[in-house]
Image: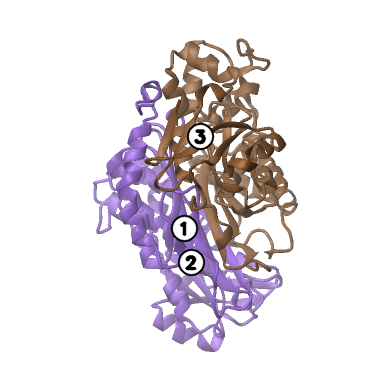
Chain colours: A brown, B purple
Amino acid sequence: MKRKPAAYARAGVDVDLGNSLKDSLPALVRKTHGPRVLGGIGGFGGLFRAAFPGMKDPVLVASMDGVGTKLKIAVLAGRHATVGEDLVNHCVNDIAVMGARPLFFLDYIGAGKLDPAVFTGVVAGLARACRNAGCALLGGETAQMPGLYHGKDYDLVGCIVGVAGRADILDGSRVRAGDALVALPSSGLHTNGYTLARKVLLGKLKLGVHDRCPGLRGTVAEELLRVHRNYEPALRSVPRRALHAAAHITGGGLPDNLPRALPEGCRAVIVRRSLRVPALFRLIAEAGNVREEEMFRVFNMGVGMVLVVAARDAAKVAESLRGRIIGRVETGPRGVDFV
Amino acid sequence: MKRKPAAYARAGVDVDLGNSLKDSLPALVRKTHGPRVLGGIGGFGGLFRAAFPGMKDPVLVASMDGVGTKLKIAVLAGRHATVGEDLVNHCVNDIAVMGARPLFFLDYIGAGKLDPAVFTGVVAGLARACRNAGCALLGGETAQMPGLYHGKDYDLVGCIVGVAGRADILDGSRVRAGDALVALPSSGLHTNGYTLARKVLLGKLKLGVHDRCPGLRGTVAEELLRVHRNYEPALRSVPRRALHAAAHITGGGLPDNLPRALPEGCRAVIVRRSLRVPALFRLIAEAGNVREEEMFRVFNMGVGMVLVVAARDAAKVAESLRGRIIGRVETGPRGVDFV
């Protein structure tokens, strides 16, 4: 039986191309594997030893996410080296705010037609971020779906699994009225709000991705492709007795995400003037005539992570992490107030 | 701060719609949760206790996959109730062939615009299959990405994590020359070959999804949307001493997937005339003028799962699982021969 899927290739799916790409992966992927990863690459599933020595009552913490239409900027700019990092870091942060450290990550790339250079760039970014996060790139799937994805478009999805001792899980139960809110700066839009950002910058302002962003240092591509920060090392550096909760500020912004870290009966009060909204967000708001309350729901507005910290530790934590105290927790219905 | 993301909605992303859909999920999802799932729904990650009492050296087995362009048929037919089952069962099978039982599953739905009925149908299917598989639907992400997904198109991705005792992992090491190959029947195309099937049935034969498939009982939609079988209960019913390996027959067909279950130095020899190729595959081959060797690489050809079984147990296993002995393992370079 010779391997020449002629009719299938004509229908738009090149099995041999898919296989040859898969052959270039092992070296990249293996660099992310520690001794807990068993077996080779190419099995039906990835294997990871579930031994957590010294951890009492280990709990797996899992999250699934995508990169959103930041991918459209990557495609327009022809720069695919960092979207994999965006995805891994996003996922790492989602479980870090629950107190977990990452164990392994799996990816999915859906595309109309696989472009080897794009594919290799994306996977290299995934592998780089996994190594930096101490996380094994345990598996992945690449699907060629002509008719669903058009032109150079692709989607990129990730799933992360981490672990935390049950007593160390940040579930909001330690949060008390009087705790301080420490904001850690974002590096840019991270992975949220790109549909609106594209509409304003590319649509309304008619900028090309290689044009300079008005009033900013970089081009549109540079400003919009800045890598989503990994906050896990920052969170880990805070003593457990000081860290009461944490919120990853993604889609929905501060108003939607901060309450997810709070228990019932606790309210976050943010002092609006304590926030330093970066120029990119101000540009989008002004050029797009977007009201501030909406800006705060669509974008992170310069805050990528909020730590809920015991009041007496707040100044020290903020200083050591180059963060900023932006408010505090008060008694009240769960939610966020801007004052 | 009032929640009315006017400009974002105009740009095609309706945050409130997304949130209201998320509100309808908890009841569906909770039905899949056992006592090992901790915490509520809506956290940044799902929590699953990593206690495996009585299991020596537990190993997590993880896999990520999609449904492929079977989704296009679901969209054309307006039937979204079963693609979630397809995805979960596909993932369950991928880790079952490594000897693992499922623990939890996470999903991703990417769409241009969220249609509540579609979304609810898909998630209901995911939840139903998770319950049937004894697997918690632990988390998920729904991304509205106008400009990337067009019209009613959406993509559906799943990640599964299961567990197996290290000594029970099926890694091919138990396979011996002389073992029998027991094929378990597929229910249809499962989730592979849809790009070619659509090209032939909808393109070349100009059939509508509600037209009867020539020579078959059902309409095109009925024949093409038959649910991907979950073989995990079948695998579990085979005594461990009898089951030496298993291969899930997905993209790449028997020639690509069967070798993944074999060790170096072992070759699968399939007796071609022992296979009963269902009428749907014969129709595609004839109408599309697709050569048999390609048919076998694109489609499962009626075989959804192959068990590699000790020769003396083969007849009994085949009978109890309504399978069929289709060949045996011989010494030789890893691969598949059709004789």
Residue A267 position by quadrant: top left
Q: Quadrant of the N terminus of chain B?
A: top left
Q: Which residue is drawn at the image coordinates 46% and 83% (left, top)?
A: B317
C-beta proximity under 8 Å, tags 2 and 1: yes
Depicted B28 relative to depicted A68: above or below: below
Q: Secondary structure at mark 1?
A: strand
Residue B335 position by quadrant: bottom right
Horizontal placement of A30 versus B161: left or right?
Answer: right
Q: Residues within 10 Å of mark 3 (few under 14, many from 20)?
A: many
Gap between marks 3 and 2 measured at Cα: 29 Å
Q: Chain of mark 3?
A: A
Q: Which mark is residue A68?
A: 3
* Residue type at tag 1: Phe
* Residue type at tag 2: Pro
Horizontal placement of A323 versus B4: left or right?
Answer: right
Depicted A242 relative to depicted A337: above or below: below
Instruction: Indicate the position of residue A36 as horizontal and vertical percent values.
Output: 70, 64
Q: Quadrant of the C terminus of chain B?
A: bottom right
Horizontal placement of B198 versus B259: left or right?
Answer: left
Q: Secondary structure at mark 2?
A: strand
Q: Secondary structure at mark 3?
A: loop
Residue B338 position by quadrant: bottom right
Residue B224 can be seen in this image: no
B121 or B189: nearer the viewer: B121
The residue tagged 2 is: B102
Instruction: Indicate the position of residue A43 as horizontal and vertical percent values.
Output: 62, 62
* Residue type at tag 3: Gly
Q: Which residue is drawn at the image coordinates 34% and 52% (left, top)?
A: B26
Q: Chain of mark 2?
A: B
Q: Residues within 10 Å of mark 1 (few under 14, many from 20)?
A: many
Q: Which mark is residue B105?
A: 1
Q: Which residue is drawn at the image coordinates 30% and 47% (left, top)?
A: B24
